[in-house]
Image (spheres, rainbow, N blue to C red):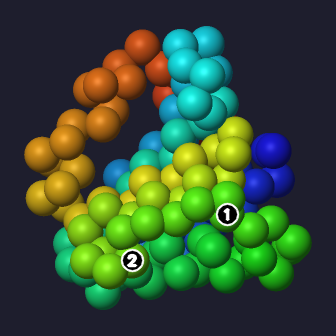
Amino acid sequence: MRDILNTIYKQMDEKQAEDARILNVSNITSIADYFVICSADNERKVKSIADAIEDELARQGTEPRFKEGFDTSRWILLDYGDIIVHVFKDEERDFYKIEKIWKDAADITSEFK
């Protein structure tokens, strides 16, 4: 799982995603163990980040169980089971405030920088 998180974070960094965060939610929900969150200032960049993550993980043999949001590219979700990736357009991230909703989650981003 750590390798997948590293790959996701690396792709976000390479595509210049804004404010990337990795939250360990394993102690507060059964939905997943980790939420990986980032944003970008336009839809094209949101799609580019999500595509890079999906393509690199596919090259490594990991496919998402579910994905949605590519039609509008304002909030793309990639579900890898224990890891859920959220790529937001800035305005959507500000509106949904996902980090505030999951404020009790441990932010482990610094482990991946």
Categorize mark 1 by other alpha carbons within 10 Å: few (<14), some (14-19), many (20+): some
Q: Position of residue 71 (x, y in %)?
A: 32, 80
Q: Locate the N terminus and report the quarter of the image it occupies.
A: top right
Q: Nearer the viewer, residue 79 or 98?
A: 79
Numbered circle sitting on residue 70: 2
Q: Do callouts 1 and 2 mark residues in contact (Cβ within 8 Å)?
A: no
Q: Quadrant of residue 41?
A: bottom left
Determine whether 20 is above or below 51 in the image: above
Q: Which residue is mark 1?
A: 64
- Percent position of residue 72, x then y: 26, 77
Quarter-of-image position of residue 73: bottom left
For the residues marked 1 and 2, what is the alpha-carbon distance in whole angstroms?
Answer: 13 Å
Q: Residue at x 27, y 26 (%)?
A: 100
How packed mark 2 is, by other alpha carbons closer than 10 Å (few <14, some 14-19, many 20 or more), is: some
Relative vertical location of residue 46 with respect to residue 105 in this rendering, above or below: below
Rendered residue at 42%/14% (across/down)? 104
In percent of width and height, residue 31 lies at 57, 30
Q: Earlier in the sequence, mark 1 or mark 2?
A: 1
Q: Residue at x 67, y 63 (%)?
A: 64
The answer to whether residue 32 shows anywhere in this view is yes
Q: What SS does tag 1 mark?
A: loop
Q: Up-down: is 60 above or below 9?
A: below
Of all residues, the one furthest to the right in this rendering is: 61
Whole-percent x and y of residue 84? 56, 47
Amino acid bearing label 1? Pro
| Residue 15 shows up from this direction | no
Q: Amino acid at mark 2?
A: Phe
Q: Is residue 87 left or right of residue 54?
A: left
Q: Residue at x 30, y 86 (%)?
A: 44
In the image: residue 73, left or right of residue 64: left
The secondary element bearing badge 2 is classed as loop
Which of the 4 image quarters holds residue 40? Answer: bottom left
